[in-house]
Image: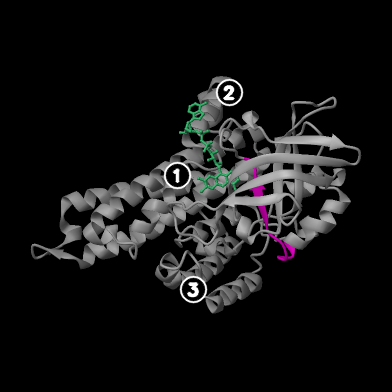
Amino acid sequence: MSHPLSAEEIEIQAKARAIVDELIPYEVEAEMNGGRLPDDARERAEKLIREAGFEAINMPKDLGGGGFTSLQQVLVQEQVGRATNALAWLIHTPASWLPHVATDVQMERWVLPTIRGELRECYAITEEGAGSDVDSIQATARREGEEYVLNGVKWHVTSFNHSEYVFFQAKLTEGPHAGEHAMFVMDVDTPGIRVVRVPEYSHTIDHHHAILAFEDVRVPATHRIGDEGDGMHFAYEWFRYERLMIAARCCGAMDRLVTEATAFAKDRIVGGEPLVERQAIQFMLADSLSELWASRLMTYRTAREIDEGVDVKIQHAHCSIAKLFVSEAAGRVADRCVQIFGGRGYMRENVAERFFRELRVERIWEGTSEIQRIIIADQLAKRGVEALAGNGE
Ligand SMILES: Cc1cc2nc3c(=O)[nH]c(=O)nc-3n(C[C@H](O)[C@H](O)[C@H](O)COP(=O)(O)OP(=O)(O)OC[C@H]3O[C@@H](n4cnc5c(N)ncnc54)[C@H](O)[C@@H]3O)c2cc1C
């Protein structure tokens, strides 16, 4: 066992695993079909997710969410990561930062229906010339009386095709906070929102990444989230959350890859011997298992310390470390597993081939590896080795 788990945590892990095991047989069909699940499989999985209480597991219980601890969420997301083609994204986690800043109107219109599983959201933040350096965004928000007029072109808006509302970040053009950022929420069918195009990406998933134009989109001031000048500042908690959950999903992917590659290596006979007897293959499997073990320990430990309430700056650094290390380890594991499968590993019907493409983005989104290194080095300079990698005293 990588980490001692309570009976309740083991039960949650087993329930999540059972749901994902139902989805895995549909991977190849989805791969050949734009990432789409057959309707009956989707409906069945959605029913299992509801029955398991896995809707909005990251939202507070008093709002109708699951109120899961960080470690419980990691256990679920690790299983989500075992399926390719994002099939297990059916286990949806809404914006957990939103209830802290949402007005009563926003709670009724967006937050509560999302927790009930009726609505889904997407994020329009990145632009052609602004990703890592989000401060360079060109999108604008101009105040006109009780409304804002929004303009800008946003890239990579994930899940736009499955969303009812969108978060939009822009710079204010005037007033005391001119030049600063503000965040807005609006329904995706608000007049002035236009799909410019829907590019193809390396992975085959049913969540598209649209390029969206916001052209003189008028929203009431009640659609602003937080205050003028806040931008995404209130969402740092979300970055920590998403980075840790990326690490969790990558652990699941690595687990699946090592399991499948080991089974193949035992089965495949070369020169009269199973492949697994060949030292070159053993080394690749040994390195992969070692990286899985290290990744899982790091991810579980980081989740546990969030639940224990350690200093938030330390949490922030550790989530970056987990995202950096585990996403890069997962890339190495996928590469080795393609090699172990040989020619089969280059076929889209092979799990290693799909993960080889799909895991690449884990080093890019929610802050690239380079950005994580900048965060980690900054924390190291400020706090020192003992605070970040010592015994926590
Ligand atoms: C599949 C996918 C889905 C996405 N979904 C969304 C979404 O839903 N909503 C959304 O708003 N965005 C989304 N993104 C955008 C994503 O967050 C950005 O792509 C990411 O933050 C990197 O920004 P960029 O693409 O502009 O790269 P750039 O910022 O242009 O970076 C290019 C390279 O330069 C490096 N670099 C940048 N700055 C530095 C620095 N200071 N020092 C050293 N190296 C640096 C980067 O690490 C990278 O290697 C998505 C992206 C992808 C690929």
* Residue 173 x %, y %: 78, 29
In this rendering, the answer to whether 150 lies above or below 120 is above
* Residue 211 x %, y %: 59, 47
Magenta segment: 115-125
- Viewer-proximal residue, 325 or 234? 234
View extreme (right): residue: 145
The amino acid sitting under disc 2 is: Arg
Question: What residue is shown with label 2?
Answer: 383
The answer to whether mark 3 and mark 1 are in CB contact below 8 A is no
Q: Earlier in the sequence, mark 3 or mark 1?
A: 3
Q: CA distance from mark 3 to mark 1?
A: 25 Å
- Viewer-proximal residue, 65 or 215? 215
Q: CA distance from mark 2 to mark 1?
A: 24 Å
Quarter of the image holding residue 45?
A: bottom right
Q: Does dot 2 land on a helix, a strand or a loop?
A: helix
In this rendering, the answer to whether 321 lies above or below 197 is above
Question: What residue is shown with label 1?
Answer: 327
